[in-house]
Amino acid sequence: MPTVECDPDEARRRLEAAGVSVSPGNTDHERWRAERGDASAVAYGGKVVVQGSRPTDLLALIRPKGGRAHVYFDGASRGNPGPAAIGWAIVTSDGIVAEGSKRIGETTNNRAEYEALVEALSVAEEYGYDEVDVRGDSQLIVKQVRGEWNTNDPGLKERRVKARELLSAFERWSLEHVPREINDRADSLANEALDDA
């Protein structure tokens, strides 16, 4: 059961800003309670206790802002263009802090990769990390965002600009190409979203 020493009022504000519903405590000693996914949090005097099978569903939001995260992203398209989906995961020393996937309609694989990157960076920014190490298995996206390769596709140019804007919000960032097996979680999430159609 992780315990976070923090200002419970500030932790509550962070939870509510992230769309987590916070309710009054059940006893005189509990200041408030919150639930998200498979985790629940209870605030006391100067701490918040997090319980459940996946405490990371709430920990990153409760902890004071800052710190470093590894961000994995992947996009998938069947048909290129065709039905597409994205997957992403944010990992810290606490394990997987957040992950997600969704179908994004009909598009190309490269556009899906960019959508996954933008979504993952947006969540990492929402969680308040200072530093991100971003990893993806699309060499094209990684090299375009780092400025090593150019693109003539206006849609990809627009997405590259958005990704660079999001990256500039962090104090430090890195973006690296990794083999698919290193990016397995994000890859699996994207493909599961396509399979669930």
Image: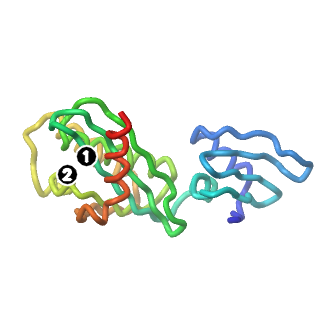
Earlier sequence position, callout 2 versus callout 1:
1
Which mark is on residue 78?
none
| Residue 4: image location, x then y, percent | 69, 63
| Separation of residues labelled 2 and 1 (CA atoms) | 7 Å
Instruction: Report if the CB atoms under discs 2 and 1 are less than 8 Å apart.
Output: yes
Judged left or right of residue 151, residue 30 is right
Q: Which residue type does callout 1 highlight? A: Glu
Residue drawn at x 73%, y 56% as measured from the top left: 7
Judged left or right of residue 181, residue 40 is right
Q: Which residue is mark 1?
A: 113
Q: Which residue is mark 2?
A: 141
The residue nearer to you, when weighing 181 against 92, is 181
| Residue 55: image location, x then y, percent | 62, 58
**Helix, strand or loop under label 1:** helix
Bin the neighbour count of mark 1 within 10 Å (Cα to Cα): few under 14, some 14-19, many 20 and up. Answer: many
Asked where in the image residue 176 lies, by quadrant, the reply is bottom left
Judged left or right of residue 159, residue 7 is right
Residue drawn at x 20%, y 54% as measured from the top left: 138
The residue nearer to you, when weighing 9 against 36, is 36
Judged left or right of residue 113, residue 94 is right
Q: In this rendering, is residue 115 above or below 175?
A: above
Q: In this rendering, is residue 140 above or below 157?
A: below
Q: Residue furthest left?
A: 152
Bin the neighbour count of mark 2 within 10 Å (Cα to Cα): few under 14, some 14-19, many 20 and up. Answer: many
**Helix, strand or loop under label 2:** helix
The residue nearer to you, when weighing 82 against 138, is 82
Q: Which residue type does callout 2 highlight? A: Ile
The residue nearer to you, when weighing 187 against 93, is 187
Q: Residue furthest right?
A: 28
Please name which of the two marks, 2 or 1, marks the residue nearer to the observer. Answer: 1
